[in-house]
Amino acid sequence: MRLTGAQIICESLIKEGVKVMFGIPGGVLLPFYDTLPQYPKIHHILCRHEQGAAHAAEGYARACGKVGVCIATSGPGATNLVTGIASAYLDSAPMVAITGQVARPFIGKDAFQEVDITGITLPITKHNYQVMSAAEVATTVKEAFHIASTGRHGPVLIDVPSDVLIEEAEFHYPEKVSLQGYKPTLRGHPAQIKKAAKMIDEAQRPLIIAGRGVLISNGSAELKELAEKCQIPVANTLLGLGSFPGTHVLSLGMLGMHGSAHCNYAVNAADVLIAIGMRFDDRATAKVAGFAPNAQIIHIDIDPAEIGKNLKVDVPIVGDVKNVLKALNAEVEQRTHVEWVRQIDSWKKEYPPLRIRQSGSVLPQYVVRQIYEVTRGNAIIVTGVGQNQMWAALYYKYDRPNTFISSGGLGPMGFELPAAMGAKVGCPDETVWCIAGDGGFQMTIQELATIVQEKLAVKIAILNNGYLGMVRQWQELFYGRRYVATPLGGPDFVKVAEAYGIAGERVTDKKLVTGAIERAMEHAGPYLIDFQVEPEENVLPMVRKGATITEMILDKPREEAKAK
Amino acid sequence: MAKHTIIALVEDRPGVLNRVASLFRRRGFNIESIAVGHAETPGISRMTIVVDGSTVSVEQVRKQLDKLINVVRVTDITETNLIARELALVKVKSTPGTRGEIIEIVDIYRAKIVDVSLDSVVVEVTGDEDKIESLLRLLKVYGVKEIARTGRIAIQRGIAGPAIEEEKAHVRAGRGKKAVEPEA
């Protein structure tokens, strides 16, 4: 069957099971968009900015586990994708980004809207391609999806010159990929697993740190089995939230820079640390030199390059988390750690997590807590970056995998709205809440139009404190309260929503928080609530810059309580 | 040993050298030398990369390189029994009076004079870096006008190629076999 390059792209996407793609057309992509109506199986969602398209693809991928697809034209379209591709790269989200390129004879001539996007995205993609003939398109798409969604997931970019889109070639979709330089290790080494099992059996104060790798490998059930069989408390990294039920008696919540105090103390006191699908990011470990000083470390990860990158470990196991945990669960002995669990409980009593101080004003923590109450912990929460992100991580308990979607590695403000949009597209039957800050929300606010056009019932909570809040918090704590360039005027968000055709309301009174959330839930379409929260509220606990994980700034009342 | 010799077998495709160079730059790995040429298998190029092990984690260099899709195999052959060579072409000032001395030195180093002109000779020398450095020191006395060096290339003695050695090292380090099929 002879088809054009554009048709081959569409046929190949369908072969890969793609039902939706996020994008914006442009000059060089016209042959592709002109072909698209021939393939009604693919739903194209027109975003309002390519950054939105890329974040939406990531949100989609992380909510439903399928590869997210975004498409942009050459030049500025392609460069606008960059932030979203980088986010997917750092958080290992499966994504295929397609960019148009100027026609082959113009490449390298600085033609109109030409940029070297494969060069630009070299360090932020798992792999990228420039397809130089229609005959290569099918194999390239096949390889791209394979690379994006196996091993350690990540974004793959395919750059397609416009004349390749109209060139004809024989279409034959390959059944298999053959990449001699890419063979991820999936099964852990049996000897290493035995060693780890012995270490776990002999541990007095074992602790699991579960990261996003557990979610990617679909290993939550195996993780739960390990924790329960050996009675090991579980701490989560930010991106690992949801991989272990947040309401489970063994759950310690989040560790790290804004981790719960009892969780950080537990990491510090543990004698065996089982790090699963996580990469010892500096936000999780704080100062590496003083991290888990008493522990022998078992590190399970699919990426061999993560072993020993940030931290020396004692028992590395390279493999897919689900596979490795299955094997490990068969080796370890049933155990209890009564003393250890009691010790952690006493820290928990001393420094109660999720405490919300008494206040007459609307506290952001309270808003998140009420969203949790009203949704009964059953929503997908998509956050921005900064304070809103940390409050959403700390004050909502995630019992199910893939219900907390947040850009942890890159941390791009403006992630929340398009990613929530993508999550809702991927999981239309789930309640999706976008928890935003007033700063980040203004960075991708234009996607409100996409939400309306696509009739996506995304619920939006803006924690509006009139500041770039996390930066302000740092200025308060470490820069003598000099608020330079952080006070933030904003528009009337309710009116903005209305202008886009979205219902909404403003909440300035604590007593009206719950009612507003309930109205949002009852409303059939998208709904925006502008919560006017306490402007100078801080995210606590907080590990000081350059300090170890136990050197935390705690809630004031708690510190006073300790002094007494 | 401070200097490590890493062999990377890579797919012979456009942009592969860029990927390797970009990785070294981005991770802050300093390359002392890199030499690229065809390997024994068609479609595969062989890169010989020398890095200073006292400034970078060679294990990280190896693993990060291995992550590149176009990189087929990476081996640190430093600890193995290897033959390392570099080729240099040196243009040395010469006069009828000094030419004889230069030829004598060149002979001692089993190097060759490959071009002679009125005021210079071109010397071709092959060997390890120490030999080349030592010859250069002697030639500098006469005035060196130009130097072109290839950087180190290396190969292991005997029959064990990098591919096999790497497989063993991989298993030894408890990382399982290189390729494991997905579980059904």
Image (spheres, grey):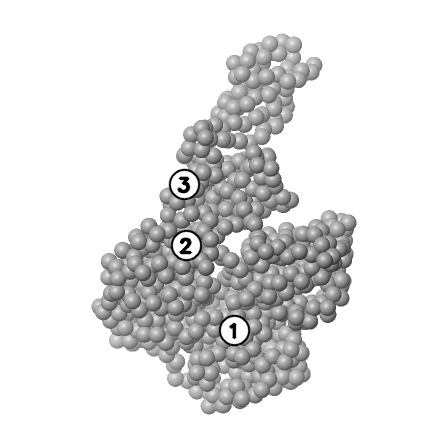
Quadrant in which the C terminus of chain A is drawn: bottom left
* Pointer 1 local density, CA inside 10 Å: few below 14, some 14–19, many at least 20: many
Q: Which residue is denoted by mark 3 in the rendering?
A: B168
Q: On the rendered structure, is B81 left or right of A493?
A: left
Q: What amino acid is labelled 2 in the image?
A: Arg
Spatial separation of the CA atoms under disc 2 and disc 3: 17 Å
Q: What amino acid is labelled 3 in the image?
A: Lys
Q: Is the residue A423 above or below the residue B27 in the image?
A: below
Spatial separation of the CA atoms under disc 1 and disc 2: 32 Å
* Residue that appears at 41% across and 61% down: A322
| Helix, strand or loop at mark 1 | strand
Q: Is residue A561 visible?
A: yes
- Mark carried by residue A382: 1
Where residue A124 sits: x, y (%)? 57, 56
Determine the chain carrying the residue at label 1.
Answer: A
Q: What amino acid is labelled 1 in the image?
A: Val
Q: Are marks 1 and 2 in contact (CB under 8 Å)?
A: no
* Residue that appears at 45% across and 33% down: B160
Q: Give whichever of A505, A102 is nearer the camera.
A: A102
